[in-house]
Amino acid sequence: MSKIIVGNWKMNGSKALVQDFAQNLKEASLSSVAVICPSFPMIAIAREAWPSEVALGAQDCSPLPQGAHTGDVSALQLRDAGAAYVILGHSERRQEHNETPELIASKIEAALATGLTPIVCIGESEAIYEAHQTVSFLKDQIRSFATLLERAKAEARPFYIAYEPLWAIGTGRLPSLEEIEQIHAALFEEIGLAPLYGGSVKLENFEPILKLEHVGGLLVGGESLKTEKFVSMLSR
Ligand code: PGA
């Protein structure tokens, strides 16, 4: 089965970038399952402009179904705009918006209830990594949404977990291939899913990571904004 590559545009991009991707995607023959997660305003525009084999995702959703919640966006609205996936629990949201494990679990529940596929991010700080506590920390993070994961598995619903070491995000520093494989294998043994890897993935380094046995795919930040590079990553 092809592995999945997810682009996370974060708070970047524009209508012009959506059109730029549309041009590049026209000639591309994709070899991975491709998902791009732009900011909310670009989702519906991209759904119109891009071929259907590129799926759309959001970077967050409300845990609530609708109502008087100014500034929030529901899972159903994301579906309506053309999203099929949603990134939840990204470390930037955990840090900048104080998202708790309980809140993230309720967002996962809302996504699943609406038929969106969750991509849930987990990852350790540099201090935890240095202390060799990574795997137990990640298992703890997973525990806070394990019931939802088990339910999704029992119902044969897709569910992704992305392992993103905090110290590797946007820094150009990555764990070694051996470390990535070791951590992913330990998580696979626990949850029966091969996590995606994220953090400083580039066109130059992605191939050996994607080939690792227990890496189910990649979550790509900065490099996913570079049209040609990202399309060529999706096509190899
Ligand atoms: P990066 O970000 O690829 O720019 O390191 C990854 C992410 O935060 O999803």
Image (cartoon, grey):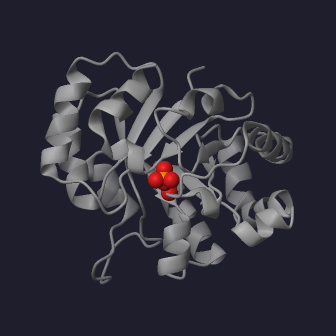
Whether residue 140 is visible, yes or no, is no
Whether residue 112 is visible, yes or no, is yes
Provide residue 53's location: percent of width, then percent of height. 34, 26
Give the quadrant of residue 159. Answer: top right
Relative horizontal placement of residue 202, taking residue 14 as reference (left or right): right
Relative horizontal placement of residue 201, taking residue 210 as reference (left or right): left
What residue sits 32% from the left and 46% below the top? 225
Provide residue 193's location: percent of width, then percent of height. 73, 40
Quadrant in the picture for the N terminus? top right
What residue sits 49% from the left and 57% below the top? 170
Viewer-nearest residue: 28 or 140: 28
State how many labels appear.
Answer: 0
What residue sits 41% from the left and 38% below the top? 35
Viewer-nearest residue: 40 or 90: 90
Relative horizontal placement of residue 191, taking residue 17 as reference (left or right): right
What residue sits 40% from the left and 69% below the top? 65
Provide residue 57's location: percent of width, then percent of height. 38, 48
Relative horizontal placement of residue 198, taking residue 188 as reference (left or right): left
- Vertical placement of residue 164 versus 236, above or below: below
